[in-house]
Image (spheres, rainbow, N blue to C red):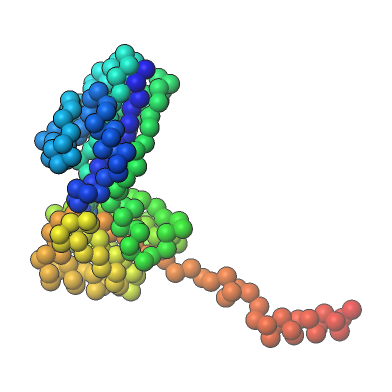
Amino acid sequence: PGKLYVVATPIGNLADISFRAVETLKQVGLIAAEDTRHVKLLLNHYGISNKIMSFHQHNEEKVAAYLLEKLRSGLSIALVSDAGTPLLSDPGLPLVQKIKDAGLDVVPIPGACALIAALSAAGLPVTQFSFEGFLPRTSSARKAFFTERLGAATTWVFYESSHRILAALQDMATVLPPDRQVVIARELTKLHETIVKTPLANALELVTQDENMRKGEFVVIVDGATKVRKEDDALSPEQLNILLVLMRKCS
Ligand code: SAM
């Protein structure tokens, strides 16, 4: 049988694609793409002419069954989304599940991912973080979401569109403290790339006042809540000394 290659494509700058990804897109028998016009721009840029099939949220189940048959008959297939890594807030999960359930190989071809790019340049802790995808669309649901995450100790990240970035920050500011560090990563790898790390109150002001800060695609990263440091619970050297002296007296 053929293999399914899950191929990451650029998130803006067309040069952000691996040699292996380009080779794979050339060599597979079929490219399953979220938007055929979109992927054609990339393929043209790299001089690749290959068969493309449209694959999106609404026909995913049906196309997945068809692609499984194709794989079984020996065809290799590349799955790409409009930008970045497929399945990450993008279609593809039912297809990957179906193919793994059938015992066939799914091979990742890693590359750009907006979430990881933003984290790598944000300057907030990344030893542990949680990815929240897109936020709920209504203000009340967003506030409930922020309330839930208020005390989270690790960094958290979400995707946002230009339509909702301001509303999201406004809702966040009603729940989180004004001095909480946030990073607004906008238009990554593109001409107007902007990565601002600043307290929430300032981020809100920036996005409210500067129209350009509401344009494009966004990753928002929020610092975890300040932890009570372990040392605060522990005894100071002086306290420890007093304790030792007392213990010696008692023995
Ligand atoms: N699969 C993609 C990935 O690996 O990053 C994400 C796809 S999701 C449908 C699109 C969202 O990702 C955008 O609304 C934005 O939040 C984020 N995004 C994608 N490209 C971006 C970029 N160049 N700069 C900032 N955010 C981006």
**Residue drawn at x 15%, y 64% as measured from the top left:** 213
Identified at 34% across, 21% down, the residue is 2
* Foreground of the two, 175 or 79: 79
Q: Quadrant of residue 17?
A: top left
Quarter of the image for residue 183 reads bottom left
- If the image is split into quadrants, where does the C terminus sit? bottom right
Tell me if 129 is positioned left or right of 41 in this view. right
Query: Residue 112, position in %: x, y?
Result: 29, 48
Task: Report the residue at 37% width, 17% height from top.
Answer: 1
Image coordinates for residue 122, horizontal then vertical, percent: 33, 64
Determine whether 27 is above or below 88 in the image: above
Q: Nearer the viewer, residue 49 or 178?
A: 49
- The residue that appears at 23% across and 38% down in the rendered structure is 81
In the rendered image, residue 91, in percent from the top left (x then y), is placed at: 26, 35
In the drawing, does residue 101 fall left or right of residue 210?
right
Q: Residue furthest top?
A: 73
| Relative to 193, 95 lies left or right | right
Residue 21: image quadrant is: top left
Residue 58: tell me if it is visible: no
Across and down, in percent, residue 84 comes to: 26, 45
Q: Is residue 232 above or below residue 170?
A: below
Camera sees residue 120? yes
- State the residue lying farthest toward the right: 251
Q: Is residue 238 left or right of residue 123?
A: right
